[in-house]
């Protein structure tokens, strides 16, 4: 049984190219409302990138008024510097959502891939192609935007389970 549609903001967080994907879903069908990336040049200092990311996320939250946000969970990273930068960016995104009172759920990359493609080891190309197909997009979204849409779609699939089990946002 379908329920009222909710707006889910999927966020594929990174320091230099954060993917954003907003979908509407009733738990059975989903459609893309908007998607894209928030980019920061490599020449920018960490603090400038984080401030830019914060500003854009708050603008998107104000403009789009999503009901819930879904982010990619942390994953193993061999490069400590990369892991720290990702952690900073995730913190900014989660804090911005928290400031707006928006519940945030996180999904492991393998969970997202398995939910969208059927395999936790799916390639980024496979994920992007499935996002295009399921959402009925005219073209394959840019990689980070496709990942953000996939994260939002994963939440749409799993949100009923969250309600049933009483699982809380992060």
Image (cartoon, helix red, strand yellow):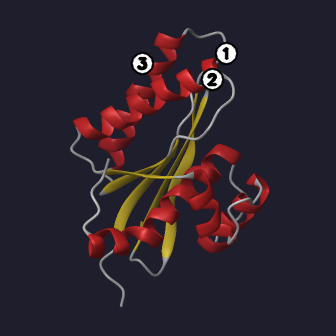
* Residue for point 70% across, 47% down: 143
Quadrant in the picture for residue 62: top left
Q: Which sits in the foreground, 79 or 135? A: 79
Q: Earlier in the sequence, mark 2 or mark 3?
A: 3
Q: Which sits in the foreground, 65 or 144? A: 144
Mark 3: give few (<14), some (14-19) or many (20+) Cα within 10 Å. Answer: few
Question: Any mark on residue 82, and which?
Answer: 2
* Residue for point 69% across, 28% down: 78
Q: Which residue is mark 3?
A: 51
Question: Any mark on residue 110, and which?
Answer: none
Mark 1 vs 2: CB contact within 8 A: no
- The kind of secondary structure element at disc 1 is loop
What x and y, as percent, mark residue 16?
61, 26
In the image as oriented, which residue stretches furthest toward the bottom?
Answer: 1
What x and y, as percent, mark residue 156?
44, 68
Q: CA distance from mark 1 to mark 2?
A: 13 Å
What x and y, as percent, mark residue 80?
62, 21
Q: Nearer the viewer, mark 2 or mark 3?
A: 2
- The kind of secondary structure element at disc 2 is helix
Decide if residue 153 is in sight here: yes
Q: Which residue is mark 1?
A: 42
Decide if residue 137 is in sight here: no
* Residue for point 32% across, 47% down: 170
Quadrant in the picture for residue 60: top left
Mark 1: give few (<14), some (14-19) or many (20+) Cα within 10 Å. Answer: few
Q: Nearer the viewer, mark 1 or mark 2?
A: 2
């Amino acid at each position: 049984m379908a329920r009222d549609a909710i707006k889910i903001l999927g966020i594929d967080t990174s320091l230099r190219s954060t993917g954003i994907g907003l979908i509407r879903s009733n738990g059975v069908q989903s459609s893309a409302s908007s998607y894209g990336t928030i980019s920061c040049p490599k020449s920018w200092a960490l603090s400038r990138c984080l401030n830019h990311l914060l500003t854009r996320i708050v603008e998107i939250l104000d403009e789009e008024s999503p009901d819930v946000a879904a982010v990619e969970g942390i994953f193993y990273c061999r490069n400590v510097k990369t892991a720290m930068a990702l952690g900073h960016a995730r913190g900014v995104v989660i804090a911005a959502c928290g400031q707006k009172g928006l519940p945030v759920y996180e999904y492991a990359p393998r969970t997202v891939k398995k939910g969208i493609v059927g395999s936790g080891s799916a390639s980024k190309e496979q994920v992007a192609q499935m996002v295009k197909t399921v959402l009925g997009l005219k073209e394959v979204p840019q990689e980070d935007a496709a990942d953000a849409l996939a994260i939002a779609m994963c939440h749409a699939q799993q949100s009923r389970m969250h309600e049933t089990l009483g699982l809380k946002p992060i």
